[in-house]
């Protein structure tokens, strides 16, 4: 019985990530799930997000200075974070395979991949007045 319940909860969380398609935070995903399933706990959503990420069904994006986000697109690709609103978007560019091989001093690391987070101001925020938070 526990396994079935866990599978149902897991599929609810996966459905929410796929429905949102916006690099949502765990809190945003929790809010989406509880709209139709108000009794699911925040801990259950968080645990299932991590399990889905670990299994490769979704991708966890660690954002410096912000909450982790979850992406329904699992292939290697880059992201950009808006400096004003904090939203994260996909970047349309070729993924650079083997970039790790160009590191001159690896400090003994064996690299397994890379993530890049670009920063800028999204089109929606550009329409608003400039902010003192707009820094490169």
Image: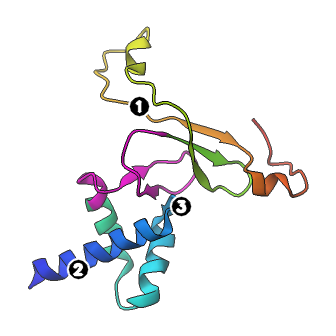
Q: Is residue 79 left or right of residue 111?
A: right
Q: Name the residue tied to disc 3.
A: 22
Q: Which residue is mark 2?
A: 8
Residue at the (44%, 55%) spot, across then down: 71
Q: Quadrant of the C terminus?
A: top right
Query: Marks 1 and 3: CB-CB under 8 Å?
Result: no
Question: Relative to 101, is 34 above or below?
Answer: below
Determine the secondary structure under disc 3: loop
Mark 1 to mark 2 CA distance (whole Å): 33 Å
Q: Which secondary structure lies at badge 1? A: loop
Along the viewing direction, whichever of 32 and 136 lies nearer the viewer: 32
Number of numbered discs visible in the structure rendering: 3
Most common secondary structure along the magenta stretch: loop
Locate residue 110, reporting x and y percent.
28, 21
Residue to which mark 1 is pinned:
114
* Number of residues whose C-alpha sits closer than 10 Å to that of mark 1, classed few (under 14), some (14–19) or many (20 or more): few
- Give the extent of the magenta segment: 52-77
**Do the residues bearing badges 3 and 2 touch, measured as CB atoms within 8 Å?**
no
The tag earlier along the polypeptide, 1 or 3, is: 3
Asked if the residue at tag 2 contacts the one at tag 1, i.e. Cβ–Cβ closer than 8 Å, the answer is: no
Q: Earlier in the sequence, mark 3 or mark 2?
A: 2
Q: Is residue 15 left or right of residue 123?
A: left
Q: Residues within 10 Å of mark 3 (few under 14, many from 20)?
A: some
Q: Is residue 89 above or below residue 32?
A: above
Give the quarter of the figure containing the N terminus.
Answer: bottom left
Label 1, label 3: how far apart the Cα atoms are:
21 Å
Residue 54 lies, in percent from the top left, at 26, 53
Q: Classify mark 2: residues with Cα within 10 Å, few (<14), some (14-19) or many (20+).
A: few
């Amino acid at each position: 019985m526990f396994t079935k319940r866990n599978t149902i909860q897991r599929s609810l969380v996966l459905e929410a990530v796929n429905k949102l398609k916006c690099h949502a935070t765990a809190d945003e995903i929790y809010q989406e799930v509880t709209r139709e399933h108000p009794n699911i706990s925040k801990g259950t959503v968080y645990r299932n997000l991590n399990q889905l990420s670990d299994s490769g069904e979704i991708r966890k994006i660690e954002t410096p200075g912000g909450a982790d986000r979850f992406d329904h697109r699992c292939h290697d690709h880059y992201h950009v974070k808006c400096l004003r609103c904090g939203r994260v978007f996909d970047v349309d560019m070729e993924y650079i395979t083997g970039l790790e091989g160009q590191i001159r001093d690896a400090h003994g690391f064996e690299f397994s991949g890379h993530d890049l987070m670009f920063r800028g101001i999204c089109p929606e925020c550009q329409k608003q007045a400039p902010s003192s938070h707009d820094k490169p």
